[in-house]
Image (cartoon, grey):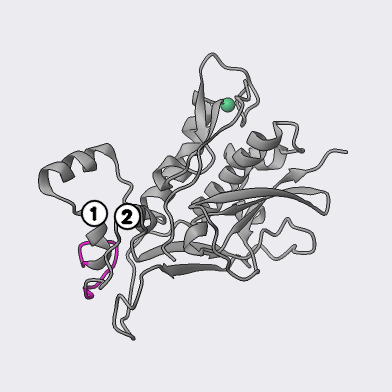
Amino acid sequence: MTPTTLMPTRRYKPLGVCMYCLQAAEKLTEEHIFPEAIGGKWKLPASVCANCQTIVNKPEALVLQGDLYTARLALEIRRKKHAKKERRDGPALPRKIATSNGPFGQQFPEPDYQPAAGELSPLITLLQFLPPSRLPGLARDESQHAVKLSMIHLGKGSPWPVGTHLSTKEPMHPWEYAYSIAKWGYAFAVAERGLECCDSSAIRDLLLGHGDDPMSFAGGIEEPLQRGTHLHWAALREEGGLLVARLHLFASAGARPYDVVVGRLMR
Ligand SMILES: [Zn+2]
């Protein structure tokens, strides 16, 4: 099965106030639940003030330019100026995955499978974490934040000979990565259930730069892999009095989902 790069478009009802500081502002901008840069199609219009946008976009930008770089290459999503250059010079970006000029530190053979339009390229890398420690029964020591780099191999056949050693020069930002996952989970929760979804003060504090432990809010899951039918997906659930968002990034590629503890349910 060829992993799809598509997901259905959603446009949620505008919140009318900033989802982070809860203030009304003259100009509120649109928030994407999953960033457009990784193919996100779910939009929450008029929901972020300019001040908060500056704060929350900084960590996310680092992740999109670093940790999720190969994923973006795999999706062939690039900035407009790259698209312009490409029209001039011919296609270039996806090949970076397989050359020493790309994010990897060493030369290895061209993959024997080249994706067609609308398919993912052969390899993406994502960070994996322990489950969020705010989930019931998971409190742990601050130092227990194991982070793994998981490489998801999408190609048909074997793109590289068995035993090919891959190394990566991709900058890793585990803190910012977990922060971004937390942000997307929170955005999804308020898009679905509004600002009254739960007591979200702790995660809003984190997102506005007053918290230092994104991995207590956002983390991995222990369950087995299951491919999704869309590029990204998300769902909400209630567990132990908490509202939890499950984000399945690169679901169609069989990536492991993440959980985000959005806040305590108010009943
Ligand atoms: Zn704001």
Q: Residue at x 67, y 58 (%)?
A: 132
Tell me, yes or no, if residue 210 can be seen here.
no
State yes or no: Cβ of the residue under disc 1 lies below 8 Å from any atom of ligand 1: no
Q: Which residue is mark 1?
A: 93
Q: Residue at x 23, y 54 (%)?
A: 93
Query: Which residue is most to the bottom?
Result: 163
Find numbered disc 2 in the image and state the secondary structure of the residue it sits on: helix
The amino acid on which the numbered mark 1 sits, given as a three-letter code, is Leu
Q: Amino acid at mark 2?
A: Leu
For residue 154, side relative to residue 258 (left or right): left
Judge left or right: residue 175 versus residue 186.
left
In this figure, which residue is indicated by the disc labeled 2? 73
Up-down relation of residue 14 to residue 234 (above or below): above
Q: Secondary structure at mark 1?
A: helix
From what the image shows, is residue 189 above or below residue 137? above
Circle 2/circle 1 CB separation < 8 Å: yes
Q: CA distance from mark 2 to mark 1?
A: 7 Å
Q: Which residues are magenta?
A: 99-109
Q: Position of residue 240 (x, y in %)?
A: 83, 54
